[in-house]
Each structure stands twice: as C-alpha cells, then as structure tokens.
Image (spheres, grey):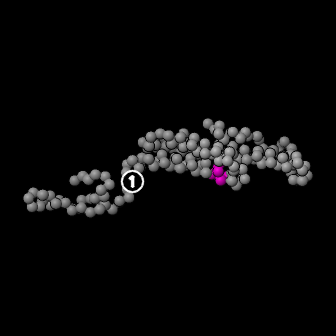
C-alpha cells in the first residue's frame, strides 16, 4: 500500500480480509515525522552557501566595528558585497549543488573570496588608521603622538572602492 508524502502513516502487520471482501489495514503514525522532503534536502546545500556568504560579510562588519571604521558607507559596501556573494555562489538551481564536486568548488571559492576580501579590508582599515594618525600628527606634530610618520612604516595604500571591486 502506498501513501502520499507527509501523511506520516505506516502499515503495521499484514492486511486482513474483512467482511464483504474489504481489506482491513492497521496503521500507525510514523516514527520520523520531522523527515525533510526531497526538495528540502536538495535546497539545503544552496541555503548553506547563502548562510556562508552572509557569515563572511558579517565577520567583515564586526571587524569594521571593532576597528572603529564602521559607518554608513562601509555598511553599504558590505551589503553590496553580501548580495554579490550570494548571487555568485548560490545562483544555481538547488539540484545543481547535489554534485559533490560542484558543491565543494563553490564552498572553497566562497572561502577564498572571503579571505581575500578580509585581507583587503584589513589593509583598508590600516590605511584609514594611518590617515587618522597622520592627520593628528600634522596638527600636533609627531612628538605629541609618539609615532613616526615615515613612509617606510605606513601600510600599503588600498583604495576604499577596493571592497566593491572584488571580482
């Protein structure tokens, strides 16, 4: 006997031929009532990539807050980055991600992208911090801050639009 999905019923024992030729079947609720549908299972890998993309940008957002560099422009750039990562790494139909090699390729690519963007963000935050220090030293002189303004000590310059221009 076949029941439609999500009825959560299973046959117990053998059917018994009742009066007037009617088969009597004993049923009970299934034990696994929280089992996901095939569609839910297929979509889970795609959803995990969306969550990973959000997590990558959330980490960058927290880093910016910790460094005191989080403002509306930074928030906008991170929102744009998250939309880009979600679209790029989870833009296929859910069935596409059932191939283990394709899924692994996407996960590894997203992690590499996150590392690259995080490195660029750290350099950007260092540049912004260096600009803050140089502004303070030009106003008060290097002796007041105790920091040198020599070019050899400053971090490499990274343009602010670098976060948006990540391929």
Residue lying farthest to the left in this orientation: 20
Left or right, 77 with respect to 91, comes to right
> Which residue sits at x=90%, y=49%?
141
Q: Residue furthest front?
A: 72
Res 128 seen here: yes
> In front: 59, or 100?
59
Q: Is residue 94 left or right of residue 148?
A: left
Q: Main secondary structure of the magenta part?
A: helix
From the image, which quarter does the C terminus lie in?
top right
Instruction: List x then y, in percent, for residue 112.
Output: 60, 43
From the viewer's perspective, tell me whether residue 13 is left or right of residue 18: right
Residue at x 24%, y 52% (from the top left corner): 2
Residues rendered magenta in the picture: 59-63
Pick the residue in front: 150 or 132: 132
Q: Is residue 11 above or below residue 131?
A: below
User: What residue sits 60% from the left and 42% below the top?
Assistant: 80
Q: Position of residue 18 (x, y in %)?
A: 11, 61
Is residue 73 found left or right of 145 in the rendered image?
left
Number of dots carrying numbers:
1
Q: Position of residue 61 (x, y in %)?
A: 64, 50
- Residue 10 lies in quadrant: bottom left
Q: Is residue 37 above or below residue 27?
A: above
- Confirm whether residue 119 shows in the render: no
Residue 85: image quadrant is top right
Residue 34 at x, y percent in the picture: 38, 58
Q: Can residue 140 be found in the magenta stretch?
A: no
What residue is pinned by disc 1?
36
Under circle 1, the secondary element is loop
Q: Residue at x 72, y 50 (%)?
A: 69
Q: Residues within 10 Å of mark 1 (few under 14, many from 20)?
A: few
């Amino acid at each position: 006997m076949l029941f439609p999905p999500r009825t959560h019923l299973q046959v117990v024992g053998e059917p018994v031929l009742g009066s007037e030729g009617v088969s009597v079947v004993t049923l009970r609720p299934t034990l696994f009532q929280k089992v996901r549908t095939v569609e839910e299972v297929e979509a889970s890998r795609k959803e995990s990539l969306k969550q990973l993309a959000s997590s990558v940008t959330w980490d960058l957002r927290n880093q910016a807050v910790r460094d005191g560099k989080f403002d509306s422009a930074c928030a906008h750039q991170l929102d744009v980055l998250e939309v880009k990562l979600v679209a790029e790494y989870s833009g296929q139909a859910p069935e596409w991600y059932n191939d283990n090699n394709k899924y692994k390729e996407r996960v590894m690519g997203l992690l590499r992208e996150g590392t690259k963007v995080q490195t660029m963000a750290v350099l950007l935050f260092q540049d912004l911090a260096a600009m803050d220090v140089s502004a303070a030293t030009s106003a008060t002189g290097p002796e007041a801050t105790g920091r040198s303004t020599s070019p050899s000590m400053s971090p490499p310059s990274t343009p602010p639009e670098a976060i948006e221009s990540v391929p």
